[in-house]
Each structure stands twice: as structure tokens, then as C-alpha cells.
Amino acid sequence: MAKGASISGFPEWLPSQRVVEQTVIDKLRKVFELNGFIGIETRAVEQGVSLLKKGETSKEIYLLSRLQEVGHESDTPIEDRLGLHFDLTVPLSRYVVEHSGDLVFPFKRWQMQKVWRGERPQEGRFREFVQADIDVIGNGDLPDHYEVELPLVMVAGLEELRDLGLPKATVHANNRKLSEGFYRGLGLEDIEGVLREIDKLDKIGADEVAKLLVKDCGANESQAHACLELAQLTAADGGELLERFDDLCAKHGVRQESDAYQLARQGLDTLAMIVDQAAQIRPGSVVADLKIARGLDYYTGSVYETFLEGAEGLGSICSGGRYDNLASQGNKRYPGVGLSIGLSRLVSYILHTAGAQASRVSPASVLVAVWDEADRATSNAIANALRARGIAADVAPTAAKLGKQIKYADKLGIPYVWFPPQVGQEGDQVKNIISGDQTPADAKSWEPDRLYARQTVRV
Amino acid sequence: MAKGASISGFPEWLPSQRVVEQTVIDKLRKVFELNGFIGIETRAVEQGVSLLKKGETSKEIYLLSRLQEVGHESDTPIEDRLGLHFDLTVPLSRYVVEHSGDLVFPFKRWQMQKVWRGERPQEGRFREFVQADIDVIGNGDLPDHYEVELPLVMVAGLEELRDLGLPKATVHANNRKLSEGFYRGLGLEDIEGVLREIDKLDKIGADEVAKLLVKDCGANESQAHACLELAQLTAADGGELLERFDDLCAKHGVRQESDAYQLARQGLDTLAMIVDQAAQIRPGSVVADLKIARGLDYYTGSVYETFLEGAEGLGSICSGGRYDNLASQGNKRYPGVGLSIGLSRLVSYILHTAGAQASRVSPASVLVAVWDEADRATSNAIANALRARGIAADVAPTAAKLGKQIKYADKLGIPYVWFPPQVGQEGDQVKNIISGDQTPADAKSWEPDRLYARQTVRV
């Protein structure tokens, strides 16, 4: 094989870094399962027609072709070709429709898999990364209590990552109906356009957004100003949120009996419920933030973004929302609500900014030394006796000088080196090469100190 | 989204089946880690040049193209395009070369990931599946004791799957040098060709193989017969193996002082060591089987295939070997030995032939009932108290009639339904809906019966 070469956007972790990623995955899985979410995996590919839904051909998708088809790829329309999934929501929708007869609804599922974005190589952008998703999908309808429970499960998951150095996470919630109703009440029609510009608020500031609203979205100065006022509205609880929103509507002439206000009010009530209930269960975990817009057009109600205290520049690390129209079959609808963690970016933060490190590279607690290649069977038997009791053990690769064997353990971070009996020595001995302590030991009963028993991650 | 459609060759498990797959993965990971193997993940893609090594363009590979490049795919030579990996050995070789400065050698790694084969759709062939691999890679050299240890770790892993209904697994070992040396000693030159035909022995029988050896590999009748005699040679231990091999050489005029015999003898000694040592550590786990050839041309010494008792028709479920020339950089070589389980096929067997089933679909032990939507907070608090003590809990989706809530638990296989306090009832109650037992309970101290504590897999 030729010399290896890294490919921009396809990150790979070194073994010690992979320990951190695996720990993140294991911790999240535990929280998801404690909350009754069911784990699934979907195939990595979807039909082009699913990936290109609504003709969004600007999507960054990788299409596949068989080696034997090279040069004839264009014979197959894109809709019929296979492509790699770019998220886990589109596959979930397809999975639910395909297997609806075999699922119990509401279907609560967790899923952690790689996704791919067929982007041009560019600094800091991943083209392959892991997402960690939870969603609940209803059959026909879906109670709105899930719109507060799901962000709370994600917060519980992120909270488990605090001891890996992750700062406190806060979910910022908004509601598409709230924004849309208010914009319509103002007389605006390009709702998608306004949401798109409002989404830029943190990046380019209020003045620039106001200019874009006027220039590109058909707003006058006063309408643009009202949109910005809504985006910047804050409140301590649901009651205050309603009060301030009504003040804003009165100020800008959005009448309470209008359809637009009713739509906004529907969204507002859900949002008020979310922040009030979240405050009861886990204070400070979910706040209303009326500038959250989310670019993806499939959200129809609640939308969420999640920011880390002191790392807001990282952007949202966990986003999602409610989607009522993503999955359907005939006249059956499968509304859902879910959130997705960009796990690879989070692991990158934990490694490179928080400075988390694996306590050791090897899962083994013990390296069994080998005095002589002819005696390797003795060392293997000791290792197997330890393994049978759940203690991970490795055996020295060669009967090299003892110093070299200890160095091998040290490089892998293995805390104990086990010395099989040898001439002039009574029984086995085990040495903690970190503390230097050496004691007699029996492979049938010896236990490592708790501190060294397991591979862990430390900050 | 349009109606979902399954894609031939891209299997997906239902939630209850995924529990079985996840259990297989968890059990194997545990064994690999107990044995000191380090987990890594590699990116899903490799450069075309790596995938097409040695110009084997017959390989079944999926190449990628960005959506924006459709119609211009051919502008980029295949060597420079990205493709999905078709195994985990080629990526490992690349990873080791790329990160050699950061790894500790010998590098023992486990890896479980999806791989893809760009085949035409055909019955019973997976185009996407999970492989579970262990390999040890040396820097410059690699002691041959790993050639007996690695198959034994795989046997230990497969042994853990016995309680999921997997039959006893036996590794069949051979050695490329042994076969090649003997064939050369007979005067044959098309070694690859002979190996390829011998590999068909179980499928088409000795007579057909003999014909093919004569027709396609330049053998005369006597040489063809000798090749078949070698393939069918059996022995109880290493000593007997050597004796019978020497008899065969004498019979067919392969002289002991020849280079060909010396090469064969090198392979034979390794094979004898493997079967003798394996017999000591785990009798019956590894046998010599001189017809094992392995199609992949990168093996240079030991080769392994693994068969299940009573399910030989399934073919080899775990294969591998020693490869001395797969990875190199300048004049540095990284010899390796490893085995790979075709995990998806194994899970398919466990599900469909052995009939293994998840004890329940949901990871939750308990469903907390909801008497009234206004009291959902009470039910949530009970569920959270259970979760805080590591007991997985779900909460009823709606405050439906109790019978409907119990039915929801039943469909998900959740064994307990928890009744929060209600008017006229003192305290909480919990009901085992399988046994019918109902008792008072406190969410701060209650524990499920051991039998129902965890999601398990039963045959």
C-alpha cells in the first residue's frame, strides 16, 4: 500500500482520542436507554429521490456508483441512484413508513451513526461525522409534552458529559408558528425569507439584518424593526412571554382576532409550556429565544438550538424541532419531534478545548510479563484467569528484558505489570508501575485498585 | 416523503432484531477489550488508489461523487476518487502507516464497522454489512505466537454468543507457505491458480477440482492428485501432521533439501505450533485443514476459516490470516495477522435460524402510568427518580384508560407498570404485568426482580 494520506473533512481519532469518543457514545446511549428510547440503525444509503426531496438540489450529497458503471453514471437519473444519508432524520422518516406495521407508536428511538456531506473540502468542515439523535414519532398525532421532554433528555445526556470537560448546555427554544403568525400579522409574506435573515442575527447584527429584510423580503422599515423586536424579546417565564408578546402585537397592530395572531398564539402557548415545565424539572435548562429560526424547512412547530456556556462561538451543538409533515403514507401522517447532536464536533471540543484525556490507551489493567518464550503458556494462563474474572489483561509481546516489557505497559498506560513465578521467587507478584508498589498476588483472587480498574476519561 | 422502499442487499433490523445485533456487538467488544485490544474507527472512505491496489479492478467497489459533479465524474481518474471501504483491513493498513508515529507496536486493535460491496443486487448477498475485526500489526516484525492467539480470541468471542443460539465454532487453519512449497515441489508454477481451484473443493468436489487443475493450472493427472491428497490430509496434532506431510512428499518426490520443501516446512511448523498450542489452551477450537486457501491475495502465511457445527453450509463466518506485505512505508514493513467476522450474516443466523429473541423491545423496565394529563409531572418525577438509580423508565404517552396504557407497555415488552398515588389510594403501586403481582412501591428504593431488570436476548 502507498503511503497513507489524510483526506480533508474525514476526521479520524487516534486510539487515545477514540477512547474519549467511545465514552461520549456510551454515556449518551445510557441516558437514552434510561429514558426508554429504542436504538436502531438504518442503512447508510437512501434513494436519490428521498435525499432530493422538494427539489433541494443545493444539498451536499454524495451519490454512489459501482466501479463497473464508471463512465455510465449518467445513464441512471439521480432520483434512482443511491446516495449517502446526510442526516438521520430523513432515514428515520423512511424507516418509520417502511416498518410502520412492526413499530409501536409513539416510537421513541435513539440512533448514533455516521452521516456524510458532499461538500467541497474546506477548513474546519467535516464531510463525515457522527450524529447522535433522539426522536419520537407518532402515528397520526403526537402529544406536545414530548416537545419539552426531548430537549430535557438531551440536556440530561449533555450533563453526563460535564465530567469530560463539557460546559453547561442550555437549549434555546422557539416556535415556527409564533414567528410565522407574527410576520403574517405584520403583513409580511416571504416567511421563509424573513426566517433566513433573522437566523443571521448573531452573525451580522441587527442593522444588517434590518437592511436585508427591506432589501430581500419585501419589508418596510417599520416591519423590519418589528421582526427584530420579536427576535430580541426575552422573558423569565411563560406568563411574561405572553404579556410581552401581546404588548408587541398591540404596538405593531397585530389584532388578536386575526388568523395570524391565532397561529402565533398556538406556537406561543407551546413555547410557554416548554419553558415553564422545563423550569420545574431542571431550572435553567431550556429558555425561550425568539431569534432561533433553523434553516431546514421541514420544521413546523418547536425549534431548538443548544449552546454551551462560554463556548457560544461554537454555535449550536444540538438542534432540532417538531416536524409534522416529514413522513406520510397515503393519508397517514407520522408527526415527530427530535434533536440531533453533532457528536464529532462535540468530541473535538472535548479533546482540543476541554483537554479531556483517556486514563490509558489500552483497555487492559494488567500486562503479564514473559520471562522466556518457552514459558509464554504460563503468562497466557495467568492472563486468562484474570480475564475470566472480568479483568482486562494483555501479555508482553516478547520475552524482552523486563525494562522493555515495563516500557511497553507504560506506553499503553497499563497500570499493572504481573510477574509470573520464576526460579528463586515464591509465587506471582504484581507491580503498580505508577505508584511503584509491588505485592504478592494470585490470579484467582487479585483485584486492581479501584482507581486503576477501568479505562476512564479525565480532564 | 414518498412511501419507503427497501433496497436489496441493504438489510435493516427491526427494533427487536437490533437488540440482538447490539448484544452481539457488546459481547464481542467485551471479549476484545478483556484481551487488551484497542478500539478504533476509520473513515468510511478511502482513495481509489488504495481500493484498487494491484489493479484488481474486478473488485466490487462503490465510488462517490458529489451531487454537483454529476455528469462530470469521469473528469477525475478513479485513483483520485473516493470510494467506500469494502473491508476493514485495507483501512487499517492505511491507518497504521498514516499514524505510525502515534501508535504503540505491536498494535492490537478491534474494529466493528459497516463495509460496502458495490455488487449487482442479487438474492442473499449483502451490499452493506457490519464486520467485526481484530488484528495485530507489528513494526518491522511480528512474533508468530499471535497466529495462535488471535484465532483463540475470536473463538472466545464466538463462545460468548453460544447463549444466543450460536453453535460451537471451530477455526480451520492452514498456511500459504505450506501449500505453495508443496505445489512448487511438485513442479507446479501457477500457485494462485491452484489455490483458487482447491478453494472450490467443498463446493464442487475432488473430481471437478482435479479436472480444473489439469485444464487451467498446467497440472498433469499425478500432480492434480497430489494437490488433492494434500488438501485432504488430516492429523490429530502437529507431530502427526509433520509425519504425514513428509510421507506425502516422499511419495510424490518432493525432496527435503529443496527450497520448495523448506518453504513448505516453514508453513508447516507454524501450523503445527498453532494446532498444538490451541489444543492446550482450548481443546477442539483450532484444527489443521489443508484445503483452506482464502481468495484474497494479501495473505502470506497462516490462513483461517471458521465453521459452525451443524451449520457448515453457512460457509466460513470468520476468516483471516497473516499478511506480511499489506502495509509498508519506504523500507518499513508492518506485518499483521487478523480475523474478521461477517457480523451481519451471523446476526441473521442467530435471528432466523437459531431463533434468538429480545426479551423486550424497549430498554425500559417500567412504564409509569399517567392518570390525568394535568398530573403528568408526578409521573415524570417518579420516572426520573427511577432513572437516577439506573432503572430505565418510560412514561405513558397519554392519560388514556389504564387498559390502553398497560397494552402499550405490553407491546413494548416493558414488564412493570407503575401507578402513581391517586385519590383513595395510599402511595405508589407497581404491577408486574407478566406475573400479575402488584405491590406497594417507593421510587426511591424499589428494584425490579432480577429476571426483569435488563433487556436480554433469549433463544
Image: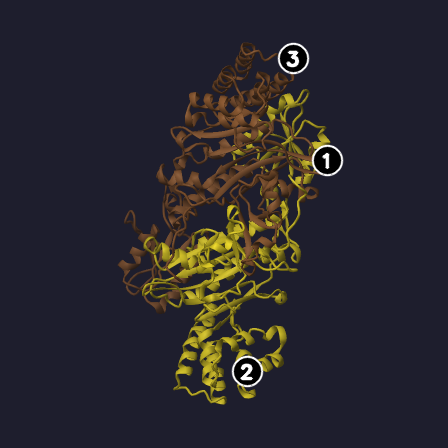
Chain colours: A brown, B yellow
Front-most of B314 and A193?
A193
**Mark 3 = which residue?**
A257
Three-letter code for the amino acid on which mark 2 is drawn: Glu
Q: Residue at x 47, y 85 (%)?
A: B187
**Mark 2 = which residue?**
B229
Distance (Cα) linking label 2 and label 3: 93 Å
Q: Position of residue A444 (x, y in %)?
A: 43, 55
Q: Which mark is residue A331?
A: 1
Does residue A439 show up? no
Cβ–Cβ below 8 Å for labels 3 and 1?
Answer: no
Front-most of B78 and A312?
B78
Give the answer, above or below, for where B42 lies relative to B235.
Answer: above
| Secondary element at tag 2 | helix
Q: Position of residue A365 (x, y in %)?
A: 38, 51
Chain of the residue on which disc 3 is drawn: A
| Secondary element at tag 1 | loop
Q: Residue A426 appears in which quarter of the rendering? A: bottom left
Chain of the residue on which disc 2 is drawn: B
- Circle nearer the N terminus (3, 1): 3
Three-letter code for the amino acid on which mark 3 is drawn: Glu
